[in-house]
Amino acid sequence: NDLILGKSASPHHSSPSDELTYQWHDFWGAGQALAEIERIATGTMTSTGLGKEVKFECVCGATNKRRMRCLPQGKIVSCINPECAETWDVEISDGEYEFARRGHYLECLCGTTHFVTSTSTEKMDRQEWGTIPCECGGKLLLRWSLNYVVMPPKSEQAATGEAAEE
């Protein structure tokens, strides 16, 4: 923790052994700066600068902090815990920031609701099946698939009595 500086070259004192040794605390503010650098270095995110910040706690227990200026409405943020797959939608209402957990609520035949994170479903391969076991003994199966509907032109919908979408 010592800082060693060589004296500036001068015609009067040019000895190579002229060194000054200072303790970090000898410099005004260096101790506080070092403590802040160490705090940032132990985190999982880099600093986004100065400004007002908002905090929210993830379901994994990690406290997430973000700078307000970096959070537009609709932005998706991830939990800072590298072991956590949670993502959150930024919602701003009357200047208040809220973080909505991204995912899907799926209901079993027994009525029990299960939450599936968006990240887990987005990472599924197209032909992969996901299984969510339920306490009732049943299970929910998930799979990505392409679905489509062919709609006739509006004139044909009117002729057949179907409601025309606008």
Image (cartoon, grey):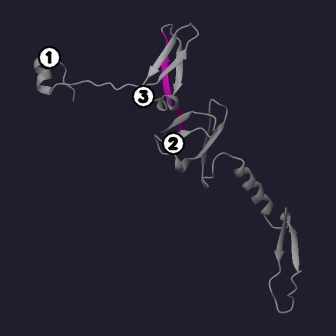
Give the label on residue 114, or none: none
Q: Where does residue 108 sit, x and y in percent of width and height?
A: 49, 12
Looking at the image, tell me whether mark 2 or mark 3 is earlier in sequence order. Answer: 2
Q: Residue at x 70, y 51 (%)?
A: 40
On screen, residue 162 versus residue 108, left or right, reads left
Q: Quadrant of the C terminus?
A: top left
Decide which of 147, 49 is in the foreground and name it. Answer: 147
Residues shaded magenta: 97-108
Q: CA distance from mark 1 to mark 2?
A: 47 Å
Q: Is residue 108 above or below residue 17?
A: above
The residue labelled by disc 1 is 161
Badge 1 density bin: few <14, some 14–19, many ≥20, Cα 10 Å: few
Give the label on residue 95, or none: 2
Q: Where does residue 36 sit, x and y in percent of width and height?
A: 73, 54
On screen, residue 51 versus residue 93, left or right, reads right
Decide which of 106, 18 is in the foreground and name it. Answer: 18
The residue labelled by disc 3 is 126
Q: Quadrant of the N terminus?
A: bottom right
Q: CA distance from mark 2 to mark 3?
A: 40 Å
Q: Amino acid at mark 2?
A: Gly
Q: Amino acid at mark 1?
A: Gly
Q: Closer to us: mark 1 or mark 2?
A: 1
Q: Residue at x 50, y 28 (%)?
A: 103
Q: Is residue 142 above or below residue 18?
A: above
